[in-house]
Amino acid sequence: VKVSELVQESFDQIDRVDGKIGAFLSLNEEAFEQAKRMDDVAKHEANPLFGLPIGVKDNIVTKGMTTTCGSKFLENFVPAHDATVVERLHEAGAITIGKLNMDEFAMGSSNENSAYKPVRNPWNTKHVPGGSSGGSAAAVAAGEVLFSLGSDTGGSIRQPAAYCGVVGLKPTYGLVSRFGLVAFASSLDQIGPLTRTVEDNAYLLSAIAGHCEMDSTSANVAATDYTQALTGDIKGLKIAVPKEYFGEGVSEGVKANIREAIQKLEALGATVDEVSLPNSKYALATYYLLASSEASSNLARFDGIRYGVRAEADALEDVFKYSRSQGFGDEVKRRIMLGTYALSSGYYDAYYKKAQQARTLIKKDFDDVLANYDVIIGPTAPTPAFELGAQLDDPVTMYANDILTIPINLAGVPAISVPAGFVDGLPVGLQIIGKHFDEATIYRAAHAFE
Ligand code: GLN
């Protein structure tokens, strides 16, 4: 097939379904012309992504294409450069089809915090797709694009991947460049791939991973071909299952599917032991304290002067104040207030410092278990996708959707969500967590399981 045909197919599918799904915030008007120019270029063996349509979460900057972060504040923001990940995908020959819907500034678990429109779950449009990368997961599940990029600060790739029945990886902190990712909580944010299959996922990660000098937290690791890990052989793989991942709040339907997944992995030759991650119970509180603190600082740059929509006012102070009060939605304001309070003098030791200490303990739990096991597995989310509106007026219940994904961001280790059955027609995700920079073993296990 020709590249232009692939791109046309992608646009046709968007025309057919996106009115119901709402995954896209904008489309790349030049994509078809770009594809046409590639029709005559011979496909290069070394570029498996050549000519393939991708969708990009709208908090990853794209040159000449609006990047809103799902916020009214950035309604008119057109970046002057591409994020490193976008640049690398374009070098590999991929074509950006459009920008994907998300919770405002990546804060949310259902995509209902988008300032533009909610995203709906392709498996059942009464239900949410998860968040904050809900557009990224739904677009792949609905066949609008083959690949997408999301970002994961506290579950935002894996939880929507689980809810939409696709594969989503949060890489090791530092493996993928954050240059051009609009920062939410810089010590937790990572960009990662969402795809239909584990193999596609490995191709995409291979193209975007590796050192980037524009990101000071980028690790000094060489480019790797992760598809080499997809041997199908997991004999002798040592798997740990934390008992906390089958605790209160995890639905019976999810547990049943994950128990079945464990049996399947054992049948493939893996060994499975129960372990404990005792400090995981502090993860949710620790995360919301730290992520909100970092967000309050990162979002200070949105003042109505440097980026986005500027409110009408005579005095400079008022420009800041009105731009921020009109531009940000409720959840973003809630996080900024929480974070500002936690960082204010007199409270710093009681909140921020305490949370950093808890983070160290949570990370140590993972390091201790992973010293003796190849991977840790469990459910990605406590329940399948819930209905739109069901948790909107209860932020704390909403936050609990990420209780099983957040500890992984705090520890900095990589984890994937792969489809593992259904409950009442809605997908369930199996989460596979690995050692720092050992995405290869995660992919090996996920591929054998799939
Ligand atoms: N739901 C979490 C939050 O709202 C996760 C967000 C994310 O990973 N970007 O903060």
Image: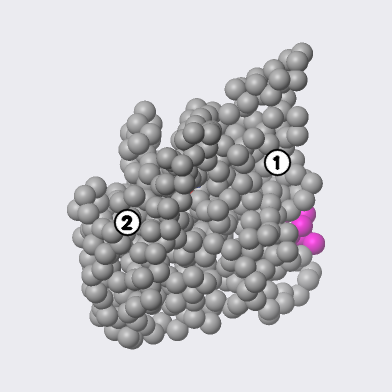
Residue depth check, mark 2 versus mark 1: number of the one nearer the observer: 2
What amino acid is labelled 2 in the image? Answer: Asn
Task: Give, as a single range, the part of the protein colored magenta.
Answer: 31-37
Residue placed at 77% from the left, 51% from the top? 81
- In the image, 269: left or right of 135? left
Q: How many labels does the image show?
A: 2
| CA neighbours of label 1 inside 10 A, class few (<14), some (14 to 19), many (20+) | many
Quadrant of residue 109 within the rendered picture:
top left
| Image quarter of the C terminus | bottom left
**Residue at the disc numbered 2:** 279
Residue nearer the viewer, 225 or 413: 413
Residue nearer the viewer, 354 or 314: 354
Label 2 sits on a secondary structure element that is: helix
Q: Is 246 drawn above or below residue 389 in the view shown?
A: below
Q: Is mark 1 within 8 Å of ligand 1?
A: no
**Residue at the disc numbered 1:** 66
Residue 21 location (% of width, % of height): 48, 42
Residue placed at 34% from the left, 71% from the top? 369
Residue nearer the viewer, 218 or 380: 218
Q: Which colour scheme is used?
A: one colour
